[in-house]
Amino acid sequence: MVLQPEEWVRQHVVNYLIENKQYPKSHINVEKQLEVNSLKKRYDIVVFNADGSIEILVECKAPEIVIDQTTFDQIARYNMNLKANYLFVTNGLEHFYCKMDLEREKYTFLRDIPDFCR
């Protein structure tokens, strides 16, 4: 089986979350369906908190895909339902991290996502 470019990015992100950021494997969920405006969509990766809330929503693109406003609009639409604390958008070459202010429906760009807190 040959890895598709987006799957390669997704696997590297999961490895980064586990190895570098110390998130437990049991808190990470990959490629599940959600409903956005009555349409069925799939998220790439979510990282859950112990209470079941979502800490991080990750959108992975293939390396040749340019990350632009459309990509951020897509993850923002998903996050209207999921309410993650952080957004992480990557194509494996460029990485963007945001902290969400859900009350004000705004986000602030960060240098990285936080490490797992025990």
Image (cartoon, rainbow, N blue to C red):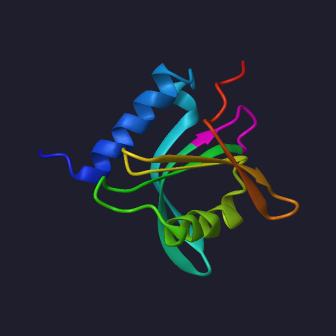
Residue 35 higher or lower than 66, as above or below: below
Q: Residue at x 63, y 36 (%)?
A: 113
Residue 24 located left or right of residue 85:
left
User: Where residue 98 appears, x then y in whole percent?
Assistant: 66, 49
Question: In the shown orientation, is residue 76 left or right of residue 106?
Answer: left
Name which quarter of the figure residue 66 lies in.
Answer: bottom left
**Residue 83 lies in the magenta-colored region:** no
Q: Is residue 28 left or right of residue 2?
A: right
Residue 53 in picture, x, y percent from top left: 73, 44
* Residue in front for this viewpoint, 54 or 86: 86
| Residue drawn at (57%, 63%) of the image | 75
For the N terminus, the image quarter is: top left
Find out whether residue 49 is within the magenta segment. Answer: yes
Q: Residue furthest bottom?
A: 38
Q: Is residue 19 above or below residue 15?
A: above
The residue that appears at 13% across and 46% down in the rendered structure is: 2
**Residue at figure coordinates x 50%, y 21% from the top left:** 20
Report how many numbered discs are placed on residues in the image: 0
> What residue span does the magenta drawing correspond to?
47-53
Q: Position of residue 72 (x, y in %)?
A: 57, 64
Judge by depth and name the residue closer to the eye, 88 or 79: 88
Q: Quadrant of residue 23?
A: top right
Q: Residue furthest right?
A: 103
104 up-or-down from 10: above or below: below
- Assign the magenta stretch its main secondary structure: loop
**The C terminus, quarter of image:** top right
Picture quadrant where residue 110 is located: top right
Q: Position of residue 36 (x, y in %)?
A: 60, 74
